[in-house]
Image (cartoon, helix red, strand yellow):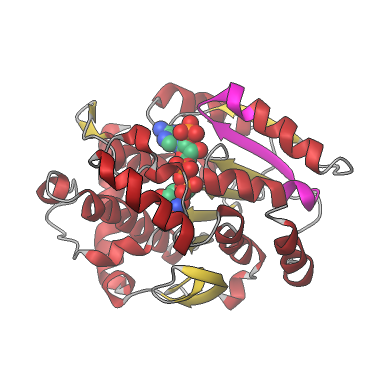
Amino acid sequence: MKYQKYLKYIDKNINKIPKNATILLSGGSGGLGSSFLHYLVYLNLNVILLLRNVELGNKIKQEVKLKFKDSTSNIEIIYFDYLDLDSINNALKILKTKKIDYFVNNSGIYHQKIEFINNFEKTYLVNFLRPCYFINKLLKLDKNIIIINVGSISYSFTKFDINDIYLTKVRNKSKTKYYGLTKYLLMSYSLYLNLKGYDVRLVHPGISSTNLFAKKNKAYPKLFYVFITPLIKLLFMNSFKASLSYFLALNTPKIDINYDEWFGPKYIFHSFGYPIKYKLNKMISDINLINEIGSKIDKILIEIY
Ligand SMILES: NC(=O)c1ccc[n+]([C@@H]2O[C@H](COP(=O)([O-])OP(=O)(O)OC[C@H]3O[C@@H](n4cnc5c(N)ncnc54)[C@H](OP(=O)(O)O)[C@@H]3O)[C@@H](O)[C@H]2O)c1
C-alpha cells in the first residue's frame, strides 16, 4: 500500500501529539486531507471533519476505518462550506460543546473561474477571508487551540501591494499569482495572530497531484490536463508523503518554532522530500508589515461580519 512506508516515518518521528487529542480538519475529502486522515486514524487520534460533501466524507471515513480496524479513533463529520456562512456559524455552535486540540485548515482552491459571492471573489473567500473569520471565532471558544494553516510557497512569486488588500490588481492577470497572494494573506494573518500570543503554525506541503489541479476546474486548455497533470504526478510526491509536513507542524513544540519559520519538504524549492522546518521568505516575515496587514484584515472582518 502507498502509505505503508510512511507509517514507519510516523512511528519514528511523531511522538509529541497528546494521546486522545482531537484534530479538527477541513478539506479532509481532498488529496492531502484524506491522506492525512489515514495517519490520524492510525495514531488513534480523534477527528472532526469539516466537509461540504458529507456523503463523500462518510465514504472516506468507512474506507479509512476499514484499513485501520483496530483504531480507537472517533471520526465525526460536520457540514461546512467556506462559501456558506451559515454552515460556518452552525459548525461553531456544534464545536462550542467539544474539546479541540488542533485545527488543521487544509481547505483550498486553485485555478478556478473568477466568481463573486457577496462582492467577494470565491478563491479569496475560501483560501483566506473565511478561514480568518472562522479561526478568530474558534480562538474565542478556546484560545489554546493550535492552528495549522496550509499555505503555499507560491506566495513568494509576487510581491504583495499593501494598497491592494482585496487583490483586485492581480485578480484577472494570473491565476497562480492570485492564488499565491490569497495564501500570502492567510499566512500573514497567521503570523499576526502569533505575534498576539496565539499558536498558529504554517505548512507548505510541497507539490502533489491532487484535485487542486483537476480537469473539472477547467482552468487551462485541455492539453494542460493531457500533458502537465500526468507530469506533476510523475515528478512530484504522492499525497501521503506530502501530508507528512502537517505532522511535523503538529508534533513540534511551540518553543522550538520561531515566528519566521514553517514546515515543508526538504528539497529543491521545497517541492519534494521529507519535511523539515525552515525560514519563511523575508517578504512575509517583516514584523511591521505583518502588523499592518493583520490590522487591515481585522478591520475588514469587523466591517463585514
Ligand atoms: N497539492 C499541492 O501541490 C499543494 C501545494 C501547496 C499547497 N497546497 C494546499 O494544500 C491544501 C490541500 O489541497 P489538496 O492539494 O489536497 O487539494 P484538493 O484535493 O483539491 O483538496 C482541497 C480540499 O478543500 C476543500 N474545499 C474546496 N472548497 C471548499 C469550500 N468552499 N469550503 C470548504 N472546503 C473546501 C475540498 O472539498 P471538496 O472535496 O468538497 O471539493 C477538498 O477537501 C490546499 O489548501 C492547497 O492550497 C497544495
Q: Is residue 97 visible?
A: no
**Boundaries of the magenta span:** 40-57
Judge by depth and name the residue closer to the eye, 26 or 226: 226
Residue 18's place in the image compared with 15, above or below, is above
Q: Is residue 210 or residue 39 the one in the foreground?
A: 210
Percent from the top left, x then y, of residue 259? 45, 72
Q: Nearer the viewer, residue 5 or 292?
A: 5
Residue 34 in sight in this render? yes
Q: Is residue 213 magenta?
A: no
Residue 261 vertical placement versus 239 (above, below): below
Q: Residue at x 79, y 66 (%)?
A: 11
Q: Residue at x 66, y 45 (%)?
A: 37
Apparent side of residue 30 relative to residue 269 in the rendered image (left or right): right
Q: Residue 6: percent from the left, percent from the top?
A: 70, 62
Q: Quadrant of the C terminus?
A: top left
Residue extending furthest toward the right: 70
Is 258 positioned to the left or the right of 187 in the image? right
Quarter of image, res 83: top left
Would residue 74 appear left or right of 225 to someone viewing this image?
right
